[in-house]
Structure formats: C-alpha cells, structure tokens
Image: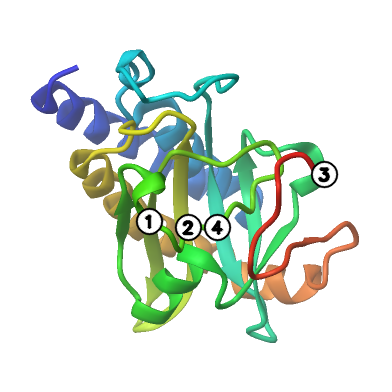
Amino acid sequence: MTEAELSAAALAMMERAGAEALDAPGPEEAMRAIARGCFDLLGDREAHLQPGALKESERQYFVAGTFFVTPDRAWHMLVGSLGFPPEQERLLVPIDGGHPGWVYANRSKLLLENTDEHGSFRQYLKTSRMGSTIFAPIMWRGAFHGQLIMAAQARGTMRPVDLAVIVACSRIAAGAWIAHDGPGWLAANYPPERGYRVERQGLDAAD
C-alpha cells in the first residue's frame, strides 16, 4: 500500500472507528473501537519479510490498545486491548516505566522503528519483546489522560506515516473518552480485580 493509498484508507478508518467509538456502550468499548481501526490498518504488512526483521523463533503479530493514567498517578492501566494475552487484560505499567513513561513525561508522540536500537526499551508484554512500536498521547484541555499504542514483532513495521495516523486517532480517542466519562469509569474500576502489575525494569517473555 502506498502512502497515498494508506492516507485514503486511514480517513475511511477514522470515520468508521470514530462513529463506532461514539456509539459504543462505554469508554472501554470506545477505546477498543479506535484501537481496532489502527490494529487492522497500520504498519508495513510485509516488514517481516525483510532480512533481520525477525529473529529465530519470532513471528510477526500485532498488539494495540490504550493506557490510561490511574487516579493515584502511579500506573498506566491497559484499556481496550487487542492482541495482548488474556491475563494481561489489565496490564499495569509503572507511571515512569519505559517508553510509556517517556510519553507521559514529555507529552509527546513517539516512534520506535526498531526497538533493538533503543537500549532503554522495556518489555512489558508477556508474550514477547516487540520490535517496532508507536505511541500517541491522549490529551484533553491540556491534561494528559493516557496514550494510544500499537506494536509489532517485526522490526521496521511501524513508519512515520503510521505515527501520523495514530496521532490523529488519539485526538478522536480523547473526545470519545471524555464523552463516555472515561475518568469516572477509571475511578470506579481502579484498582482492577485482575491487575497484572509489572516492575519498571520489565519482564522476561519466559516468565
């Protein structure tokens, strides 16, 4: 898919996902609708065919979702996830942990085309270390609420054009989150019954 084709597809995706998010029964379903749009469209779908994109025993797969800052501002809590293992449905990453922590501290979008080139990258996904990822802050009236993320196993999957699209989607996510009283929902659902807390330094996929 060329960048022009992706741009056209992205506009259609945002229209559809935005409508689904606003019609959703609650904030988590709204976030999942937007994450699903990104999950189904973004990333170079042939990146895994490039030399060095995958290491031995790795396979290409994707994850997407949103992380929201918990009421005590101690964690990023996973909401509306796709591709994460069931036991990590309520993944809790320390507020200053890894690159989610960097996005929170800097209130800035972030693209890691190849996580091997970033020594500070931390693995929080139980399944495996991801090779390429993008992050976009979810902001409302200057306040940082969370971030929309997507990642892939194969290095080089995520590109600047994908970052641009997910940033646009994060703006839609912000409006949907507030419209559905996401902050109220978060306060009522934190701490989660089946929270999966990870240490700041990350974890080993074998654990």
Residue 36 vs 116, above or below: the answer is: above
> Regarding mark 3 in the picture, which secondary structure is present there?
helix
- Residue located farthest toward the left when viewing the structure as drawn: 4
First in sequence: mark 3 vs mark 2: 3
Disc 4 versus disc 2: distance between alpha carbons? Answer: 4 Å
- Please tell me whether mark 4 sits on a helix, a strand or a loop: loop
Contact? badges 1 and 2 (CB < 8 Å): yes
Q: Position of residue 22 (x, y in %)?
A: 48, 49
x, y percentage for residue 25?
65, 48
> Which numbered disc, 3 or 2, marks the residue closer to the eye?
2
N-terminal of the two: label 4 or label 3? 3
Residue under label 4:
122
Q: Where the N terminus falls, by quadrant?
A: top left
Q: Which residue is mark 1?
A: 118
User: Is 131 left, or right, of 89 in this rendering?
Assistant: left
User: Mark 4 and 3 residues: CB-CB less than 8 Å, in contact?
Assistant: no
In the image, what residue type sits under mark 2? Answer: Phe
Neighbour class for label 3 at 10 Å: few (<14), some, many (≥20)? few
Q: Secondary structure at mark 1?
A: loop
The residue pinned by badge 3 equals 87
Gap in angstroms between the C-alphas marked 4 and 1: 9 Å
Pointer 1 or 3: first along the chain: 3
> Around disc 4, counting alpha carbons within 10 Å, would you say few (fewer than 14), some (14 to 19), or many (20 or more)?
many
Give the residue drawn at x 49%, y 31%: 153
Marks 1 and 2 sit apart, C-alpha to C-alpha, by 6 Å
User: What secondary structure is found at the residue carrying circle 2?
Assistant: loop
Kind of residue at badge 3 = Glu
Q: Label 1 amino acid?
A: His
Determine whether label 3 and label 2 are within 8 Å by CB.
no
- Which residue in the protein does label 2 denote? 121
Marks 3 and 2, how far apart at CA: 22 Å
